[in-house]
Image: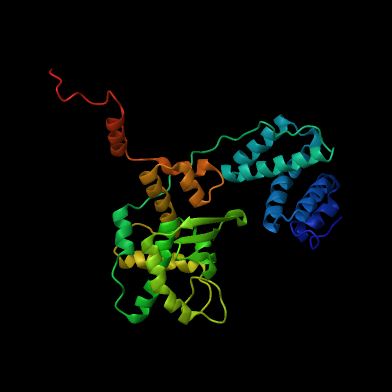
């Protein structure tokens, strides 16, 4: 049996338990082979741990019923899912993740000739409706971004950097993690574009607005004074001279909102929501906004397609041939 040290997704306590539990050990032997295969394919340790956690819970369930992987059918799977939701009180999203791990594992078992049927085939949990993101209106963003600089020189310098960050978040729809990961070489102020490395290490090019570009230009002289050694980060901590953290950006946005007299809770992802909503409202080009946001699935972008009823009515009145009465109509 492999130890926890050789396979990080297995804890020491679990490894000790496996030595005492032959039935569970037999169930997990193919799981360990599967995870080892995924590790060779460069899956992250975080992914391997998540996969192991999901499949291990089903293994425990099957051991309790004295079943093997090949004797787990759709009925047994449904019982397991119900148990996780009703007895273990797991959130629907967490059960979805477990089901995804189980689906991948059974796919591997079939590839290896260790199983003939995947009980997850055609099995789907009903998704809960995705909540619409909060959106700040344009007036509130203007209140935040166009506020006067603080009175003290030190705070005024920090505001130049903070304004550049917030303008870029709203201008280009970046995630806060993408923002702090930016290097100097990722920004092209002459062509007004930024190269962003998003989820899955995928890169995309996104336009930069004129206001964001101007704010970055005003910040750069201070950045060059603050930077320590040869740090390539675009956004630098004045005190440390190194790359800013996501936590620092979150805190600075709350400070700026408070100083601007904004009561609404402001957080970096809200600026990304505003970018998406305002871009869709102005253009209606869902595919273009999907590309700029870096969404792999267009359904994620579609949550921003809600519009207020007044605008909907205006569009209807302009477009539908029988929406309004002719001006010369006599009652």
Q: Residue at x 52, y 70 (%)?
A: 184
Colour scheme of the picture: rainbow
Q: Is residue 142 above or below residue 58?
A: below
Q: Is residue 285 above or below residue 294?
A: above
Q: Residue at x 59, y 44 (%)?
A: 89
Residue sitting nearer the eye, 9 or 274: 274
In the rendered image, the quadrant that contains the N terminus is bottom right
**190 sits to left or right of 78:** left
Residue sitting nearer the eye, 88 or 121: 121
Q: Position of residue 256 (x, y in %)?
A: 36, 67
Q: Position of residue 314 (x, y in %)?
A: 28, 35
Among the 4 quarters of the image, the one containing residue 65: top right
Residue 267 visible: no
In this view, which residue lies farthest toward the left? 330
In the rendered image, the quadrant that contains the C terminus is top left
In this view, which residue lies farthest toward the front? 190
Q: Is residue 327 above or below residue 50?
A: above
Residue 143 visible: yes
Residue sitting nearer the eye, 218 or 110: 218
In this view, which residue lies farthest toward the top? 331
Q: Position of residue 31 (x, y in %)?
A: 79, 47
**42 sits to left or right of 16:** left
User: Total of numbered circles in the picture?
Assistant: 0
**5 sits to left or right of 49:** right
Among the 4 quarters of the image, the one containing residue 250: bottom left
Residue sitting nearer the eye, 253 or 197: 197
Q: Position of residue 109 (x, y in %)?
A: 80, 40
């Amino acid at each position: 049996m492999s130890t926890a040290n050789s396979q990080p997704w297995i804890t020491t306590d679990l490894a000790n338990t496996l030595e005492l539990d032959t039935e569970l050990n037999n169930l997990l032997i193919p799981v360990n082979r599967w995870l080892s295969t995924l590790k060779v394919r460069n899956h992250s340790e975080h992914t391997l741990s998540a996969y192991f956690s999901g499949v291990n819970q089903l293994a425990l369930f099957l051991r309790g019923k004295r079943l093997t992987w090949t004797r787990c059918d759709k009925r047994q799977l449904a019982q397991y899912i119900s148990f996780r939701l009703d007895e273990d009180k797991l959130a629907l999203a967490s059960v979805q993740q477990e089901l995804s791990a189980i689906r991948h594992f059974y796919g591997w078992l079939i590839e290896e000739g260790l199983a003939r049927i995947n009980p997850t085939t055609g099995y789907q949990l009903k998704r809960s409706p995705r909540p619409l993101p909060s959106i700040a209106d344009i007036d509130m963003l203007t209140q935040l971004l166009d506020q006067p600089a603080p009175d003290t020189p030190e705070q005024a310098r920090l505001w130049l950097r903070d304004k550049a960050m917030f303008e870029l978040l709203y201008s280009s729809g970046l995630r806060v993690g993408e923002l702090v990961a930016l290097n100097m070489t990722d920004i092209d102020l002459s062509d007004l574009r930024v190269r962003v490395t998003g989820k899955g290490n995928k890169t995309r090019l996104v336009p930069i607005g004129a206001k964001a570009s101007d704010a970055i230009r005003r910040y750069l002289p201070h950045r060059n004074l603050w930077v320590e050694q040869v740090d390539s980060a675009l956004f630098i901590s004045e005190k440390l001279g190194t790359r800013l953290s996501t936590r620092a950006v979150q805190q600075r946005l709350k400070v700026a909102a408070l100083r601007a007299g904004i009561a609404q809770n402001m957080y970096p992802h809200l600026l990304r929501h505003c970018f998406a909503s305002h871009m869709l409202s102005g253009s209606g080009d869902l595919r273009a906004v999907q590309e700029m946001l870096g969404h792999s699935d267009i359904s994620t972008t579609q949550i921003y397609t809600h519009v207020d009823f007044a605008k909907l009515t205006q569009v209807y009145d302009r477009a539908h041939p029988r929406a309004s009465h002719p001006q010369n109509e006599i009652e």
